[in-house]
Image (cartoon, grey):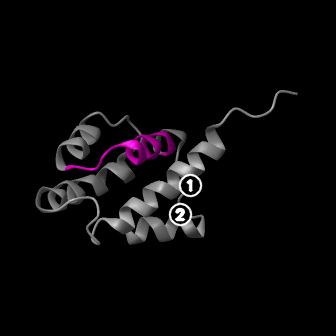
Amino acid sequence: MTTLQQSYDEGTWIPLAEELQFAGQLARLPWTEGTIRAAKREAPLGTECLTLLLDNLAVVLRYTDARDPAVLPLRAFVDVLADDADRQLAPGPEQ
């Protein structure tokens, strides 16, 4: 996760629209092992960078909840992507 976030922060990884939309969906989910596994199964094509992170997350959530310090960095990163999705994917003002 750290490498992906660093790449995003540096601008060397620019998420596709599908990845931003998927991050928005993840941000709105209650994070449990079941919801994360379901999200991964239903993830659209083109979201592989994010779905790879969900395997470890699901295992962690098997033993703890979304407030665990091990989960918070990923949650924060997904929230940043979701916020960016809202800004980038929102319809612009009509001209």
Specify the quadrant of the image occupied by residue 67: bottom left
Q: Position of residue 9 (x, y in %)?
A: 56, 68
For this rendering, which residue is in front, 64 or 4? Answer: 64
Residue ID for mark 2? 8
Say which residue appears at 35% left-offset and 66% top-offset.
72
Q: Which residues are magenta?
A: 20-32
Q: Earlier in the sequence, mark 1 or mark 2?
A: 2
Say which residue appears at 24% left-offset and 58% top-offset.
57
> How many numbered marks have been drawn onto this rendered protein structure?
2
Label 2: few (<14), some (14–19) or many (≥20) C-alpha neighbours in 10 Å: some
In the picture, the quarter occupied by the C terminus is top right
| Residue type at the position of mark 1 | Ile
Label 1: few (<14), some (14–19) or many (≥20) C-alpha neighbours in 10 Å: few
Q: Position of residue 54 (x, y in %)?
A: 27, 53
Residue placed furthest toward the right: 95
In the displayed structure, does residue 65 sit left or right of residue 14? left
Find residue 54 and name its label: none
Q: Is residue 95 above or below residue 62?
A: above
Say which residue appears at 75% left-offset and 34% top-offset.
92
SS state under label 2: helix
Q: Is residue 35 above or below residue 56?
A: above
Q: Is residue 84 above or below residue 95?
A: below
Cα distance between the residues tagged 1 and 2: 6 Å
| Disc 1 + disc 2, Cβ < 8 Å | yes
Q: Position of residue 28 (x, y in %)?
A: 41, 43
| Residue type at the position of mark 2 | Tyr
| Residue 87 within the segment the image draws in magenta | no
Residue ID for mark 1? 14
